[in-house]
Image (cartoon, coloured by chain):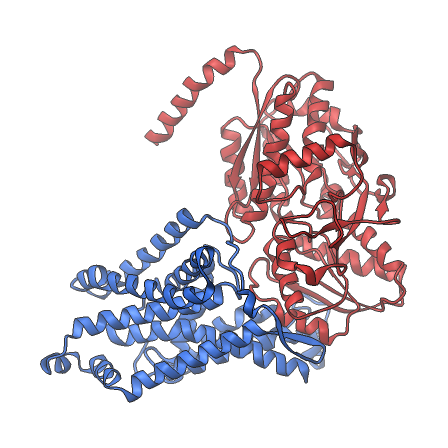
Chain colours: A red, B blue
Amino acid sequence: MKRIMSAALAAMVLAVPAGQAMSETLKIAFIDPLSGPFGGTGDAGLRHWEHAANLVNADDGVNGNQVEIIGFDNKINPKESLIQLQKAIDQGVRYIAQGNGSSVASALIDAIDKHNKRNPGEEVLFLNYAAVDPVFTNDRCSFWHFRFDSDADMKMEAVTDWINNKPEIKKVYIIGQDYSFGKAVAAAAVKMIGEKRPDIEIVGNELHPLGKVKDFTPYIQKMISSEADAVITGNWGADMVLLVKAATSSGHDVPYLTYYAGGLGAAAAMGEGAVGRVLTVSEVNTNLDTPGAQDELIDGFEDKYTEISYYYQRVFNAMNMLDMAATKADSIDPTKVAMALEGMEYETPYGTVTMRADNHQILQSLYMSTFSKDVKRDVEKTGLGWVSGEGDKIEAADTAMETSCKMSRP
Amino acid sequence: METILFSLLNGVIYGLLLFMLSSGLTLIFSMMGILNFAHASFYMLGAYFAYSFTQVTSFWLALIFAPILVGLFGAAVERWGLRKVHANGHVAELLFTFGLAYLIDEVVKIIWGKNTVDYQIPHALDFPLFELFGAQYPAYRMFILVVAVAMLAVLWYLLKRTRIGLIIQASLTHPHMVGHLGHNVPRIFMAVFGAGCALAALAGVIGGNYLTTEPSMATFMGPVVFVVVVVGGLGSLEGAFIASLLIGLMQTFAISISASFGDIFGWAGLSPTSELGSITISSLAPMLPFLMLVLILMIRPNGLMGTREV
């Protein structure tokens, strides 16, 4: 206790000179796994947030305020996340960024709703950059939650559109992580395939424990026996890496339609064996044609963090939209910023994105990208990367879905 | 058919890996009468040492030197740690190894970081060995099998056919008598502890790149290894061998069964869409070792081959 007191005192002393310079620091608490099987994924997210913050800071900050990203390790545990959330709030943080794990996002949304109800004037805003359970922008939508990634249904729409154009696919295997997100992906896949291609047989629909499987070979074996023509998976982090590693070493030679094969570590694990076979749906791949400024940004990022590749365009979208909203509201008060974010449009190098006002879901173009040898920009120094061709782009407006959200605003 | 064959192969390999880990633990238990809680941590150290070796030299050197290094470390722990604590009784020893496990965990995090390290399969072994029913079988898995069987053979020969084995076996049951015959029993204990740790490290070296090398690998493997030792019978090598294979096979076979309770007990009126009926056998795989532990303790408290009470 004594130590906390003295630390607080020291922090106060240090904070005084900053306070004199009119502007404040806008702190964003990054609550994600920074250790354990998903630590690498969380760490890569943190690097993107830090880089985005540095860019905004170099350009006069968010409405004149410098941004500081503070990492909190939640060990991908919802309970631990709430402890970290409280810690962040106690440090005066008013903005929370989180993405890895819809189970965590769900707990955070509840806790932030409660906090904001009980502490008027000290509201906290949740910037969700990757937790894609559709329920957060439907039945359980909250005014304090903004999602900067397309939800699981929107991504599945893109995946099933791709399958729709491949008449040779007759049998599909679905594998996912056993929690709300994996279940949402599986449900969306079954529903949409049933609507678009009733002739396709779902030969497997499997959930495995989150982050516990170290060898996926028995699962791959099952897929091979089922004679599936394609595999759909929402796996991410270590579960994605180990799944494709096992698939490659078993020579499972069918398309893998994934949400997160573009994530950290997967490319290195896949290697040449996965070329042309693994596909991923995302808002960006680094081989799309973009203005030169974007190339510079990506170069700057990859020169600074040599271990990881540019992946989360949406983090930069979120940071810039936060800046625009704060400028529009002329305040960094979360309530005012949230009001300004509603319905906001933003020009990214990959097209216009819009934050829906009715459910706080971003609308952004999605690309189906294929793992390829023939790339300008590779990932993780493998010489391999992601490319998309004609018809692989889904326009932002086409990703919009009906929502059951009944938003209550302050 | 192919499912059975592949599950058999994968199950045996996982089982042998488990045996490599638990053989040391069960040896140490039968000698000193304590469960070494830090045993899985030596497995983790083996994997991390091997990773560091591969960064500067080759995997083959790691295969030899990482277990030796960890074995020496284990011997040092026994000589200057456990032996001192021994005077204060079994509970103190138990707590000592418990603390050691946490200590190693934290030290590993400080040295190698909190995230998975990129410990790769050696290039020379990174190719499909054969193709069966449309699935390739990686050569590295066969390599694990060969190493494990070789280790098993050496261990068996050493314990059952040599003078060293004779003395070790004698000191398990009659340490005082062995001491009176002029053998240095504490040194034998130290050697066995070191050798047990080296075996765990060997499992780490070949298992670290087959599975993953990360700071939570010890906590992940630890409980399963204890299940093996208890199910097999505390102190029984044969028991540990049978239990390892049993658990390895059970887990891989369970994953390959897609049937749910609803399918199996449909005749009893259990609907496949109900809460209980929708549980599939494959989702039960991680639970099976512990189910086995509970059942064995209820039915055969000595374990499969054990002679003493748990």
Number of numbered markers: 0
Residue nearest the observer in this picture, A356 or B204: B204
If the image is split into quadrants, where does the C terminus of chain A sit?
top right
Q: Indicate whether A366 appears above or below A124.
A: below
Quarter of the view holding residue A116: top right
If the image is split into quadrants, where does the N terminus of chain A sit?
top left
- Name the spot of residue B113 as percent of width and height, x first: 45, 48
Q: Indicate whether A174 appears above or below A157.
A: below
Residue nearest the observer in this picture, A294 or A164: A294
- Name the spot of residue A292 as percent of width and height, x first: 76, 32
* Residue that extends furthest to the bottom in the rendered view of this protein: B161
Which residue is drawn at the image coordinates 63% and 82% (left, top)? Answer: B4
Q: Is there any visible trace of residue A28 in the rendered image?
A: yes
Q: Is residue B117 left or right of residue A310?
A: left
Q: Indicate whether A7 appears above or below B269.
A: above
Q: Is residue A337 left or right of residue B240?
A: right
- Name the spot of residue A305 as percent of width and height, x first: 58, 39
Q: Is there any visible trace of residue B37 in the rendered image?
A: no
Quarter of the view holding residue A363: top right
Q: Is residue A35 left or right of residue A401?
A: left
Which residue is drawn at the image coordinates 65% and 25% (left, top)? Answer: A56
- Name the spot of residue B244 as percent of width and height, x first: 46, 77
Residue nearest the observer in this picture, A4 or B262: A4
